[in-house]
Image (cartoon, grey):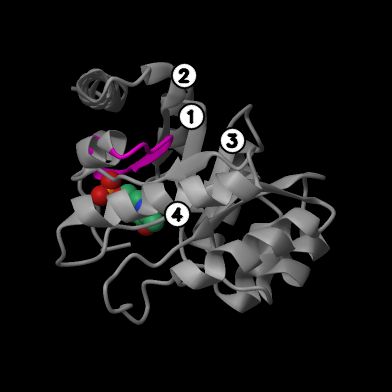
Amino acid sequence: MDRQTELDLNLQQVQDRISQAARAAGRNVQDITLIAVTKTWPATDISLLADLGVRDIGENKDQEAKEKYAQLGKSGLNWHAIGQIQSNKAKSIATWADVVHGFDRPDLLPALAKATRTSDLEILIQVNLADTPTPGRGGATPAELLPLANLVAQTPGFVLGGVMAVAPLGQDCAPAFERLAKLAQSLQTEHPAANKISAGMSDDLEIAVNFGATHLRIGSSILGHRNYQG
Ligand SMILES: *Cc1c(COP(=O)(O)O)cnc(C)c1O
């Protein structure tokens, strides 16, 4: 089987899963965006996915994403920076990203502002959903969410998109995603347009859809198993 056929089949399976989950949750599948997470995979895979109708691409390592962006250009795609942001990489991320999902502290903002390619870089605030925050997984505490959101909303050049989270390691993700949905709701009382919820990966997309995720970040179910844990 050639790569295009393989990606096509995997993509259809994932889209079927999303449709079923949306139906089960009484949601409109149109309200759910699939982000294909192409980290560790070559730029040629991004082109094949674009040919198959994928419009949203996720990358978590700045250097790798930058190389692919240099090869492909924007290609009509929305480029999502989905990983944790190291302070010294923020400026570089803004040269290729349309949407930044890992925003979790105020000091990233000036660096992102320096290089942003779009005049309205979209920011999703990452929230740490663990009962006891795990070092290295990133994310603001729930109490930090609103102050961070206010800061982003007030800063010219940025658009506040909503919230993002990664399911806490080794914990049941349903209560975590439920908590995220409540945080998203409280954010929207202050910022009604910030209605995006980025949650759900290959293994937990159904649960994320059940709790209102609008953006799913799906890697291995579409691209295959990665050689490193990225
Ligand atoms: C790699 C990654 C994903 C995709 O994970 P899969 O399990 O391969 O679907 C989603 N979100 C983030 C932040 C990631 O780093």
- Amino acid type for the residue under numbered disc 1: Ser
Image point 48% across, 29% down: which residue? Answer: 47
Q: Secondary structure at mark 1?
A: helix
Image point 81% across, 59% down: which residue? Answer: 155
Is residue 148 positioned above or below 65 on the image?
below
Alpha carbons under labels 4 and 2: distance apart? 36 Å
Q: Earlier in the sequence, mark 4 or mark 1?
A: 1
Image point 51% across, 27% down: which residue? Answer: 55
Q: Tell which of 111 and 63 is nearer to you.
A: 111
Alpha carbons under labels 1 and 2: distance apart? 6 Å
Mark 1 highlights which residue? Answer: 47
Query: Of the residues tagged 3 and 1, which is closer to the observer?
Result: 3
The quarter of the image holding the N terminus is top left
Q: Secondary structure at mark 4?
A: helix
Q: Earlier in the sequence, mark 4 or mark 3?
A: 3
Residue 170 occupies quadrant: bottom left
Mark 3 highlights which residue? Answer: 78
Q: Which mark is residue 183?
A: 4
Q: Which mark is residue 51?
A: 2
Q: Is residue 213 magenta?
A: yes
Extent of the magenta region: 211-221
